[in-house]
Image (tube, rainbow, N blue to C red):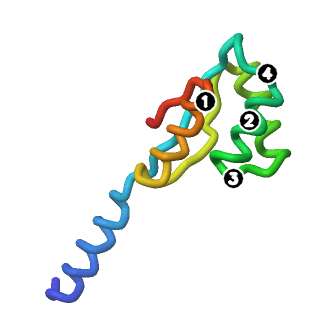
Amino acid sequence: MSTKEKTSEELLLKEATVTQNEIVLHNDDVNTFDHVIETLIHACEHTAEQAEQCAILVHYKGKCTVKTGLYDDLKPRCSILLEAGLSAEII
């Protein structure tokens, strides 16, 4: 195997190991659908339809992944959700 091929192979392996994290929103008995929807639109830049679908999934399934990406992008978004009184975590 040539040096060029080996370097290309190592680069592909490094790209494959970039991890995507998720913000998972959990159901609670406190927040209204409207509050959850408005907060998702603000914090996660969802459309109204996306936010409503997530709110419905959280209500019926107990949790829903609301945003996927790099940890550094998700951390401030998750903080906004938490500050708004929602139950969320980054996994």
The disc labelled 1 sits on which kind of residue?
A: Leu
Identified by mark 2, the residue type is: Cys
Residue at 33% from the left image edge and 71% from the top image edge: 12
The residue nearer to you, when weighing 4 against 48, is 48
The residue sitting at 78% across, 45% down in the picture is 50
Residue 64 point in image, percent of width and height:
64, 31
Front position among marks 3 and 1: 3
Cα–Cα gap, marks 1 and 2: 9 Å
Residue type pointed to by label 3: Glu
- Sequence-earlier tag: 3 or 2: 3
Q: Based on the displayed image, in which of its 4 quarters is residue 8 positioned?
A: bottom left
| Marks 4, 2: nearer the viewer | 4
Find residue 25 and name its label: 1
Question: Which residue extends farthest front?
Answer: 83
The residue at the point 59 percent across, 35 percent down is: 81
Residue 28 % position (x, y): 66, 15
Q: CB atoms at circles 1 and 2 under 8 Å apart? A: yes
Q: CA distance from mark 3 to mark 1?
A: 15 Å
**Direction from residue 32 to residue 77 in the image, left or right:** left
Q: Are marks 3 and 4 in contact (CB under 8 Å)?
A: no
* Residue on which disc 2 sits: 54
Query: Residue tagged by mark 3?
Result: 45
Horizontal and vertical percent position of residue 11:
28, 74
Disc 2 on helix, strand or loop?
A: helix
Q: Earlier in the sequence, mark 4 or mark 2?
A: 4
Residue 5's disc is: none
Residue 59 lies left or right of residue 7; in this view the side is right
